[in-house]
Amino acid sequence: MTVKSGNILLLATIPLLMILVYMIETLVPEVVYYQISSPQLKRFFEDRLVVHLTDQHLVNFGWREEMTLSRVEEINPDLIIMTGDYLEAHTDIRDFERYINRLTAIATVIATPGNNDYCCMDTLVRVFAEAGVVFLKNQAVLLERPGDSLYLVGLEDNFLWKDDYFRAASSVPAGVGRIVLGHAPGIAEKIDPEGVELIMSGHLHGGQISLPLLGSSLSSNRICFCSTFYTGGLYEVNGITLLSNRGLGTSIVPIRFFARPEIAVLEFEN
């Protein structure tokens, strides 16, 4: 091979590598297992699995959606929790219905809204109701097992200041354990930590595009309303464990880099 032909081969390879990176970083969900330390949650869930999905930003049913569903089916969780940004203004609702119906066939789904969803809230409420999703909007739902109970407190979107934790938790008896579902992780700095075992959120997409040395394209307090940028993973805020999920879809630009789509699987330990 001559130097010239080698250079041509290299130039031809670069676009293929870029396509491969795009496909893996943007379209292929990563299953991430989180060990949550909480004796109360361990007692309630025992060895049952909870899957957390967020920020689908579903427009059409494509490869990412099929891979997400296939992996969740393989995990076979006992509960699926979703924390907002399901839709775009131009979402194919029939594709979204197909996606949600596949999820509810796997396990009980409990969901809360995100800021994107207010474009089409009536449609979202209808689809969730028809699919049997428990949709919490500043409300709480009681989960019960023999001899034990746990509340899920689901907030309306806190990025748009529609959340009302005290209204949502008004039906929860004092001192009873609860998991709080809020779209943006900044909610962890805002709520009363009394009785809260875990907060689950999304919104920040893991930064969506993270460049070496330059950091995340979304590392601004203006999109978080929080003192710390909770990019993704587990944090401790005011003594509470916060899970900030990287989410599945994209916002503004259809690209992820060093912030792969995430399917979070929660396991509990003492």
Image: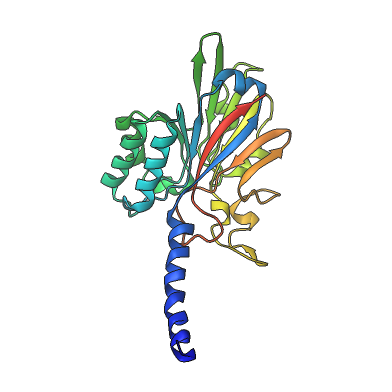
User: Which one is nearer the viewer's eye here, 64 or 84?
Assistant: 64
User: Which one is nearer the viewer's eye here, 122 or 129?
Assistant: 129
Horizontally, residue 13 falls left or right of residue 97, namely right
Horizontally, residue 79 falls left or right of residue 132, namely right
Seen in the picture, residue 189 relative to 249 is either above or below; the reply is: above
Horizontally, residue 14 falls left or right of residue 211, namely left
**Residue 15 in view:** yes
**Residue drawn at 45 percent across, 46 percent down:** 85
Which quadrant does the N terminus fall into?
bottom left
Question: x, y (%) of residue 5?
Answer: 43, 88
Q: Quadrant of residue 149?
A: top right
Q: Quadrant of residue 242?
A: top right
**Residue drawn at 65 percent across, 38 percent down:** 188
Which quadrant does the C terminus fall into?
top right
Question: x, y (%) of residue 190?
Answer: 66, 38
Q: Residue furthest right?
A: 239
User: Which one is nearer the viewer's eye here, 1 or 109?
Assistant: 1
Q: Residue furthest top?
A: 147
**Residue drawn at 42 percent across, 55 percent down:** 27
Q: Residue furthest left?
A: 94
Question: x, y (%) of residue 4?
Answer: 46, 91
Question: x, y (%) of residue 101?
Answer: 31, 35
**Residue 254 in view:** no
How many numbered marks are there?
0
